[in-house]
């Protein structure tokens, strides 16, 4: 809060002639200097529908002026009291003038917030302070997990929604924050929420996609990125992507933010279709969400990739079908189709394993589901391994692999040196917040590995759009030049890699 | 909730605008998209405070409790209503002395505190010599109690004895009453620990001449609106702790006619005018009582981390919170950093002393330094330093004062209502604009400057707030 409400009493007096309404308020002990009060009076009188207005300290002289103007000032008003009096032709004009007056008496001119006589004020040190300086709609928090609650509560108390990028926030705190948000009609996106798009602004890791009819509720950041990129490739944009955090659909959190997001998107006129993307939710929460989705006016397409379920690409195709839009050929850039002797397509020899090195958890899970469908449940028995280098276990104390490629490049070199590894499968996620040129670091390492090992194949799942700062097509070309087969669809990339392991020729 | 357009505070229907705290790359990504970002210069709080901060600030109702407490502080309407002897108005018995700051024993008392207590013993006629006074005090012959435990505040040593006359300030809004003694002026004065014959003689005159005449004038005048005087003085270059020149002039002007009308010989009335008019700090004690009345109105809100007292006894610095009752959180008082009079230097300075930090507690003093460019050099700075100090205080306060405004900041209200949790979170300590007492009893004032509380008192207060038993009321 920044101001204390005036304590005075207000009188509305209907006696004015010609239907004018008088409003007089006395704010006891609220001193203002006469110059600022004259300026306030002048700007109120300048409003449409306001006949007369005066804001002044209750000195004898001023009370006389007010009386002459015909305002009835209550007895007992003295020089220490602030009197405001407005006469207006219509109720709306009076309300408007009163609101404007409150704003003026609250008394800070915009210049005071920024550069004053002595330059800009020092930067805000808390979210509360920053929120008081601007009329933001959301706070994006990426402070360490144990420090999230004070900042998040600051935001909620100031009427801001919250996106918590941080992980390592205890689940009890998550529930408490989400309950507080619900009390205030706001949403907490996260913790561990990597991706959101609100009103065209990408928060966290987000791709530059066109505006459009699809709203997303995302418990999975890279899942949402995959969907928005595929839709973008099909010429369909998104209205908003509301992340909810990876635990939102757990039994403990019980979909609190997902329900708020569904309701908000349902009420949003720009959203014609809602997609909900998550790792498979807890069964009871899944029932809750499906029940809530049934009650909405807006259709909901679920994307919950798991073995036996639709993958993300199929979910995107279902969404396109629901919108009556055609499903395109998903973009791919095949090294195997070039120079007559593609490298990605030659396939791993029998007995050589698939090694997946991922930055996106959902992309890894989806690839694993695809691999299990084709290679059998026990991937480990065949030496196949898919690792998420964005998992908490790898990111504690270091940057996410979408920002800093070092850890994954080391793992890539290790795998290339392992004769048991036949096919490398990697995801590359573009967009705001991500490494400005991932192919710049990855392509030379891939090229060297493929040059040294004639029996090795590489497949890349490239999640991005042509409008991303990294330029998807340029990234694809660089990776392709290095010898990798590149797919916009993660599921297609995974199938292609699995077939290569299985020794199948050609494409997915 | 309003129409569907207002879901999520209208988030989906407006141009995006973001507050960002944490890693810079995420804020940069927004800037790259031309999205307006207000960044937070976030830094981790002291290790070991995370859990308490999360526990206190995560409670439902915490913000409401803090808003209620600071709202009470800022809506207080302190009025000077009377002037009466301490023995009468506080029920102070002979042999009982009030002092500044948190509780203190003679053994731990600093030079100026000892000097002031000795002077008060002499004033009350309990002993004949300073040596005798010191001996009696060392034996525990007198009862010592903090002013704050009696609705009272005292500048510097803050010693109050039964025969001293007190300003009586009533909060017309919430009904509380606060007291402060009459200001003795500068130089060799009791509050700085001086107890020579001229000190005692002045105090005797204040009891016999000044007090009764002021009482008559105040009663004749009727309640004097102190907030109005303070608001005007702030726009005339006072910050109301170390500079009270404008407020003093306004108060004397306010009471002039009623003083002149007093039933007393003209030379006695003239003495009062001469004394009050010649003492630039005459208003300080009225302002302190006004601040105390406002701060006391904010006491006792369960769970609130609002600071309702900051006080120093020359040895310890103590604070109290609205939500933790009468409990003091104390640490060693620091030595102010500032300018020294004459040949005095830092080696002559006593650690921080006085209840006058009640002015900072209520949004004045160091918090209003930007309003007082005339004194910033006196406390060892330049005008931009004063502006920076005030601006820094907005980071640790809950509100802006609705009546006390700073012209230099386009009439922004002063930062008011210190939130102990924000002090811990930011590491920004309240800035206190204070006088410096000489270390040796009897020296008097040696300088003026700025001082900060020890950081650990806020951490200790936070930990107490996190304990069960000081929870805010649950929201309805």
Image: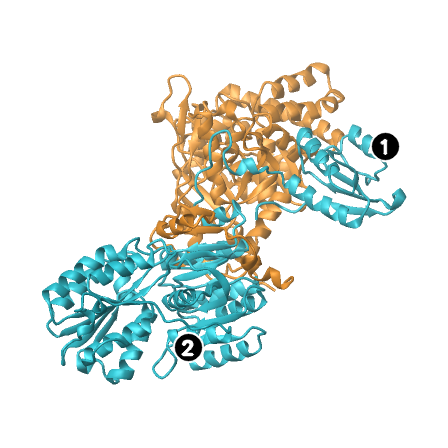
Chain colours: A cyan, B orange
Asked if the residue under mark 2 is in contact with the one under mark 1, i.e. CB atoms within 8 Å, the reply is: no
Q: Which residue is mark 1?
A: A68
Q: Nearer the viewer, mark 1 or mark 2?
A: 2
- Image quarter where the N terminus of chain B lies is bottom right
Binning the other alpha carbons within 10 Å of mark 2 as few (below 14), some (14 to 19) or many (20 upward) gives: many
Q: Position of residue B217 (x, y in %)?
A: 72, 27
Q: Nearer the viewer, residue B22 or B105?
A: B22
Residue A290 vs residue A23, the one in the foreground: A290
Query: On residue A281, which mark appears?
Result: 2
Residue A86, image x and y in percent? Answer: 78, 41
Q: Position of residue A53 (x, y in %)?
A: 77, 37
Q: Answer whether residue B152 is visible to the viewer in this image.
A: yes
Residue A457 tag number: none
Q: Residue A441: give x, y in percent of width and height.
A: 22, 56
Numbered disc 1: secondary structure? helix
The residue most toward the top is: B267
Query: Of A160 and B163, which appears nearest the observer?
Result: A160
The secondary element bearing badge 2 is classed as loop
Q: Chain of mark 2?
A: A
The span from disc 1 to disc 2 (Cα, nearest Å) is 72 Å
- Give the image quarter of residue B237: top right
């Amino acid at each position: 809060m920044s101001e204390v409400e005036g304590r005075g009493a207000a009188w509305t007096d209907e006696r004015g002639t010609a239907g004018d309404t008088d409003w007089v308020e006395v704010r006891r002990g609220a001193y203002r200097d006469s110059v600022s009060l004259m300026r306030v009076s002048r700007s109120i009188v300048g409003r449409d529908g306001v006949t007369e207005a005066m804001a002044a300290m209750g000195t004898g002289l001023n009370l006389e002026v007010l009386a002459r103007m015909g305002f009835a000032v209550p007895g007992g008003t003295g020089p220490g009291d602030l009197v405001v009096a407005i006469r207006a032709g219509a109720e709306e004009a009076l309300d408007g003038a009163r609101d404007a007056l409150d704003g003026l008496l609250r008394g800070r001119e915009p210049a005071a917030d920024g550069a004053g006589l002595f330059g800009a004020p020092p930067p805000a040190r808390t979210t509360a302070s920053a929120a008081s300086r601007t009329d933001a709609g959301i706070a994006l928090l990426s402070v360490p997990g144990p420090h999230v609650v004070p900042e998040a509560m600051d935001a909620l108390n100031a009427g801001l929604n919250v996106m918590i990028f941080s992980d390592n926030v205890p689940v009890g705190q998550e529930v408490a924050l989400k309950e507080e948000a619900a009390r205030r009609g706001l949403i907490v996106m996260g913790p561990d929420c990597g991706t959101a798009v609100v009103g065209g602004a990408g928060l966290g890791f987000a791709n530059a996609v066109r505006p459009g009819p699809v709203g997303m509720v995302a418990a999975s950041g890279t899942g949402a990125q995959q969907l928005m990129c595929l839709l973008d490739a099909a010429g369909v944009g998104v209205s908003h992507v509301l992340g909810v955090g990876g635990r939102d659909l757990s039994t403990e959190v019980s979909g609190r933010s997902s329900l708020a997001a569904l309701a908000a998107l349902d009420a949003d006129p720009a959203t014609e279709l809602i997609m909900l993307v998550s790792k498979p939710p807890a069964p009871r929460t899944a029932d809750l969400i499906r029940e809530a989705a049934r009650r909405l006016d807006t259709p909901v397409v679920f994307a919950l990739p798991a073995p036996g379920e639709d993958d993300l690409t199929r979910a995107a195709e279902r969404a396109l079908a629901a919108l009556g839009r055609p499903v395109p050929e998903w973009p791919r850039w095949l090294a195997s189709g070039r120079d007559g002797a593609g490298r990605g397509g030659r396939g791993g020899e029998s007995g050589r394993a698939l090694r997946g090195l991922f930055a996106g958890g959902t992309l890894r899970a989806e690839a694993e589901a695809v691999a299990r469908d084709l290679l059998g449940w026990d991937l480990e028995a065949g030496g196949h391994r898919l690792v998420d280098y964005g998992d908490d276990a790898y990111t504690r104390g270091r940057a996410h692999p979408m920002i800093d490629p070092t850890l994954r490049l080391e793992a890539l070199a290790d795998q290339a040196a392992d004769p048991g590894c036949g096919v490398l499968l990697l995801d590359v996620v573009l967009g705001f917040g991500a490494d400005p040129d991932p192919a710049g670091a990855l392509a030379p390492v891939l090229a060297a590995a493929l040059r040294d090992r004639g029996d090795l194949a590489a497949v890349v799942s490239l999640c991005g759009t042509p409008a991303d700062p990294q330029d998807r097509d340029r990234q694809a070309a660089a990776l392709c030049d290095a010898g990798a087969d590149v797919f916009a669809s993660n599921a297609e990339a995974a199938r292609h890699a699995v077939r290569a392991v299985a020794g199948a020729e050609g494409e997915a | 909730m309003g129409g569907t357009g207002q879901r999520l505070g209208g988030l989906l229907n407006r141009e995006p605008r973001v507050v960002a705290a944490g890693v810079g790359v995420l804020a940069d990504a927004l800037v790259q998209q031309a999205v307006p970002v207000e960044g937070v210069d976030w830094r981790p709080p002291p290790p070991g405070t995370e859990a308490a901060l999360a526990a206190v600030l995560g409670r439902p109702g915490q913000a409401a409790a803090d808003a209620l407490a600071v709202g009470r502080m800022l809506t207080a309407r302190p009025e000077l209503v009377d002037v009466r002897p301490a023995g009468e108005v506080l029920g102070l018995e002979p042999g009982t002395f009030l002092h500044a700051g948190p509780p203190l024993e003679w053994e731990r008392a600093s030079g100026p505190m000892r000097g002031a207590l000795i002077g008060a013993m002499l004033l009350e006629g309990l002993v004949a010599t300073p040596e005798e006074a010191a001996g009696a005090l060392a034996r525990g012959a007198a009862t010592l109690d903090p002013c704050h435990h009696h609705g009272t505040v005292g500048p510097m040593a803050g010693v109050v004895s039964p025969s001293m006359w007190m300003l009586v300030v009533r909060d017309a809004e919430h009904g509380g009453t606060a007291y402060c003694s009459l200001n003795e002026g500068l130089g060799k004065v009791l509050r700085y620990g001086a107890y020579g014959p001229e000190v005692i003689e002045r105090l005797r005159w204040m009891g016999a001449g000044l007090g009764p005449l002021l009482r008559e004038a105040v009663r004749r005048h009727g309640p004097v609106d102190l907030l109005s005087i303070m608001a005007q003085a702030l726009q005339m270059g006072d910050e109301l702790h170390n500079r009270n020149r404008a407020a003093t002039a306004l108060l004397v002007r306010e009471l002039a006619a009623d003083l002149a009308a007093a039933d007393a010989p003209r030379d006695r009335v003239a003495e009062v005018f001469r004394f009050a008019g010649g003492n630039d700090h005459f208003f300080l004690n009225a302002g302190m009582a006004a601040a105390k009345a406002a701060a006391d109105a904010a006491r006792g809100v369960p769970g609130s981390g609002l600071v309702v007292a900051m006080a120093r006894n020359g040895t310890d610095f103590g604070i109290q919170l609205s939500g933790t009752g009468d409990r003091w959180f104390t640490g060693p008082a620091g030595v102010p950093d500032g300018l020294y009079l004459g040949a005095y230097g830092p080696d002559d300075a006593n650690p921080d002393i006085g209840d006058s930090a009640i002015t900072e507690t209520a949004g004045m003093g160091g918090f209003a330094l930007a309003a007082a460019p005339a004194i910033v050099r006196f406390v060892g700075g330049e005008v931009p330093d004063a502006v920076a100090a005030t601006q820094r205080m907005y980071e640790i306060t809950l509100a802006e004062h609705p009546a006390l405004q700073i012209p230099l900041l386009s009439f922004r209200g002063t930062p008011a209502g210190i939130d102990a949790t924000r002090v811990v979170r930011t590491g920004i300590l309240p800035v206190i604009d204070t006088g410096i007492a000489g270390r040796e009893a009897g020296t008097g004032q040696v300088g003026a400057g700025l001082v900060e509380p020890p950081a650990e008192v806020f951490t200790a207060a936070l930990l107490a707030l996190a304990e069960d038993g000081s929870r805010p009321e649950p929201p309805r």
